[in-house]
Amino acid sequence: MNWDIIKATYQEQYEEDVLTLSGEGCTIVLHNDDYNTFDHVIESLVEVCKHEAEQAEQCAWITHFVGKCEVKKGSEELLKSMYRKLKVRGLTVTLEK
């Protein structure tokens, strides 16, 4: 078992949780559109945001019915990269502070 990877994963999650609780950081918001399929949105959230498939599907349904969904919270530094990758995949997302 690679303990460095496990430690890094928990450290990243801890830092995201601290930023969220302190009110700092950013949020990636997914917006509904008429051209991305559910499968494409789910696949993108799993690959880019590291969501579980079930979580990604829930975000897709919320976005479909509500019009938008917060899909990731964390530091601006971490989220800028994810935001760009989601945009390249054609998703309608915003990065909000």
Image (cartoon, rainbow, N blue to C red):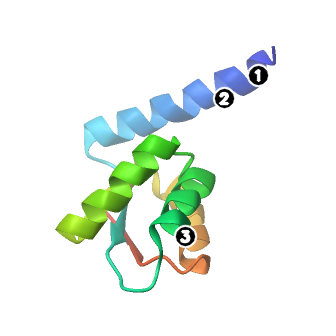
- Check whether the beta carbons of the residues at disc 1 and disc 2 lie within 8 A of each other: yes
Residue 8 disc label: 2
- Check whether the beta carbons of the residues at disc 1 and disc 3 lie within 8 A of each other: no
| Mark 1 vs mark 3, CA separation in Å | 27 Å
Residue at (44, 39) in percent of width and height: 16
Which amino acid lies under the numbered mark 3 shown in the image of this protein? Leu
Specify whether 40 is left or right of 71: right
| Mark 3 vs mark 2, CA separation in Å | 23 Å
Specify whether 2 is left or right of 70: right
In the rendered view, tell whether residue 19 sits above or below residue 77. above
| Residue ID for mark 1 | 4
Residue 82, image x, y percentages: 56, 61
Residue 2, image x, y percentages: 81, 19
| Residue ID for mark 3 | 86
Residue 64, image x, y percentages: 28, 68
Asked if residue 35 can be seen in this view, the reply is yes
Residue at (20, 66) in percent of width and height: 65
Residue 18 figure quarter: top left
Residue 32 disc label: none
In the rendered view, tell whether residue 28 sits above or below residue 13. below
Residue at (41, 44) in percent of width and height: 55
> Dot 2, crowdedness within 10 Å: few (<14), some or many (≥20)?
few
Residue furthest toward the left? 66
